[in-house]
Amino acid sequence: MSIKKILVLTTLFAFVYTGVLAQADSINIVSTAVPFLRISPDARAGGMGDAAIATAPEANAPFWNLAKVAFAKKRTGIAFNYTPWLRDLGLNDVYLASAAFYHKLDDNNIISSSLRFFSLGNIQLTDFSGNILNTVRPSEFAIDGGYTRVLSNKMSLAVALRYINSRLVVGDVGTGVVYRAGNAMAGDVSLFYNGINADGQGLNWGVTLSNLGTKVGYTNDARNKDFLPANLGVGVAYTKAINDMNKITFAADINKLLVPVSPAATGNYTTDSTNLANYRSTGVVSSWFKSFSDGSNQLNALQISVGTEYSYDEKFLLRAGYFYEDKSRGNRRYFSAGAGFNLSFMTVNVSYLVPSGSGVTRNPLSNTLRLGVVFNLGEE
């Protein structure tokens, strides 16, 4: 297996486009670097179909909408999550681990940080002739720091700065090309409206712009760089207090990747090479706007997450959700379920991705299990 194929495979391991190989229809390929940033990192959102932009705030908020932490109940929150990845494909050494933290300096100012680490396990490199080169263990991580400001008793705004490192292959592995770790800087901007009233019910909404940053390259060739998975997200969540002991929340998120589709192949090598070069030379800011006018069906570009969370006495929680992606963009569609257990200072979350499909159409994310724990510290 060549080094170029390895780079492609590691990307596929990080972010599987379910059903693409089984579809006869044409697809709109949206290729980005570090797609692990689009994997749901926490167990609570994982149980709600990855809907989390406007749900109740807690320590995992930096992964979805940092502005939410302004309305978290506790002064300090710390979260840890672990997700074995693609176990349904027989991969036992691929996983995503994450941690997040926030702390309220006072009533109006909050600082935060989060870390995501993605391990792709051991990969055996070979050349085009099948000769063994060596074994590598690719990994990627992202670490960020954020600041949240309360704008009013119902609204908050947040910004975050992120450093991203993608260490797929480093050095000359026998192909004549020297590879290096890819590095990038990115930022997030998010807004949150807290509509929960004194009775514990109401409508929340949020808007996020995430992973707005530089391109990522793995060689010294400045022309051969990929876009980050910049994203625009909008979410709403409505909580209904059935009585003093029972509450139910309904949430929905819509996400749009701010990356234009790759140029369609024409079969002419010269034309395709020129089109690809022009695509790669597109500026970062230009690419965000071009993603809305790249010639593809914009409705098909939307990813939709819907979920619900039932709470009994704020101690026991049940969750369910559904994630939808159009078949032209990957065809990831799955149900998820989850549960949470609240103690006075700690919440334990677990989620499960329900198996779907069979044979070549089986969802490779089936049976994905996420585990998480959140520590709620300090006074309310």
Image (cartoon, rainbow, N blue to C red):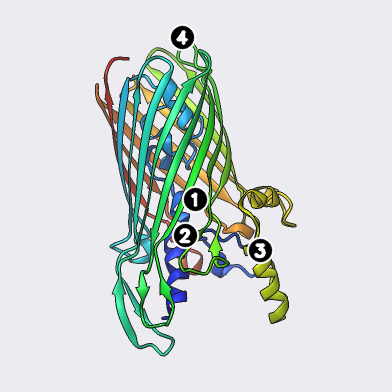
Q: Nearer the viewer, mark 4 or mark 3?
A: 3
Q: Residue 334 bears which disc, if any? A: 1
Mark 3 — residue?
Answer: 279
Q: Is residue 267 left or right of residue 307?
A: right
Q: Secondary structure at mark 2?
A: loop
Residue drawn at the location 34% of the way across and 46% of the way down: 370
Q: Nearer the viewer, mark 3 or mark 2?
A: 3
Residue type beneath disc 1: Tyr
Mark 2 — residue?
Answer: 363
Mark 2, Cα crowd under 10 Å, few <14 / some 14-19 / many 20+, is many
Q: Residue 198 bears which disc, if any? A: 4
Alpha carbons under labels 1 and 4: distance apart: 35 Å
- The image quadrant where one finds the C terminus is top left
Q: Are marks 3 and 2 in contact (CB under 8 Å)?
A: no
Front-lying residue, 172 or 252: 172
Which numbered disc flags the more N-terminal residue, 1 or 3? 3
Residue closest to the far bottom: 129
Alpha carbons under labels 3 and 2: distance apart: 31 Å
Q: Secondary structure at mark 1?
A: strand
